[in-house]
Image: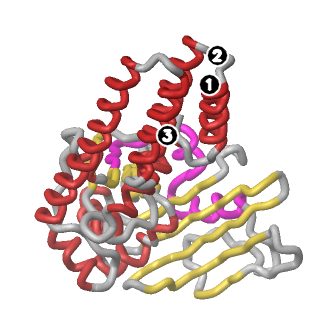
Amino acid sequence: MTDADKTIEVLLLRAPLDLTLPVIVGAQRAMQGPLERIDDARFPSKPSEERHFELMAESVDQANEFVMNVPSLCGSVIATPTDAPHLTLVEAPACLNLSRAISHLAPRLMVVEVVSHILGHDRETNRFAIWQGGADIRLRENDNSVPDAPDLNEGEAQPWETPVSPLSRLTRFDLIANIQGLGVDLAEVLGRRHFQQSIGLAPLLASTISQNKTAFDAYQGLTDRAVASGFGGYACPDDLAKSRRKETQFRAVLTAIEAEFEDRLSQADDPADILALARETTDRLATHGWRAEPRIMQVLAAALAKSMATQPDHLATQTLQALHDRAARKAYILG
């Protein structure tokens, strides 16, 4: 593992995976709602750039019924490091704040949090924290992008920690070296993905569930405890079914608008008529919010292609070209 790995966001739990999996699932489901289990996962699930905006939009649309609290759309990998079966490694977005929830659900379990972000050739932030009983009992953190800013160094150092001078800046190298006292080479584990066993947990939105992906429903009691203790919120099965119906209806409406457009476009030859049809259709799609933006782009592309094939120099064709190009420049348009 090198500085090219811009982001490290990892938890190390001082117990084997078979003992820690229930509390991890309970905590993550409380934060993200229904989850899909993926055996032998090697990397946390992450929406592609093409899907990320659409998924964000879906999470907003469904917020009251499905995903009550979605700090991140990325999933997690829960693994047993090959050379450290006494530990559980959890690779998950730091913004989920799983450390506190897990340590609350399992008060005797020590949770070690390791976060390192490389921000440039000379900028990085590093954090090392230990959680137990729902509280952070140790914190070492810095941000070397702020000149002369002192490190935070709180709590009593653990016997297994590698001594680091409180006056020195905590670097990624120091951070990884500090963790070796737990009996694991984190750089080797993450660099080569050396896992004895691994499980992925990916958050499910209604659209993904409609693709025949089922939610992993084990350890529901621990999720209930996490929610009752104020950690996130999750949807019950009835809410999930209602959201899936809503998603199906939404897609059906957009598909019907597109089908009507395609039928009328096939009969249109005059660029002016094609332009009017494109404007009418995109206006209808726009009333359904930002999730219709990809279909708007498809409509404009189809209309422009038809008009270019008939009269490329027509004023209406040029107008369609301008509308298409302007839409394509929008950062949120999905190709």
**Residue shown at 21%/55% (left/top)?**
246
Q: Which mark is residue 29?
A: none
- Disc 3 element: helix
Is tag 1's residue or tag 2's residue first in the polypeptide sequence? 2
Residue that mark 1 sits on: 317
Q: Is residue 44 visible?
A: no
Q: Left or right: 268 with respect to 145?
A: left
- Circles 1 and 3, Cβ within 8 Å, touching? The answer is no
Q: Is residue 31 above or below residue 243?
A: below
Tell me which residue sits at (22%, 67%) in the image.
Answer: 235
The residue that label 3 is drawn on is: 279
| Badge 1 vs badge 2, beta-carbon distance below 8 Å | yes
Q: Is residue 208 visible?
A: yes
**Helix or strand or loop: what does disc 2 sit on?**
loop
Q: Which mark is residue 312?
A: 2
Residue at 81% from the left image edge and 68% from the top image edge: 145
Name, please, the residue furthest toward the left: 238
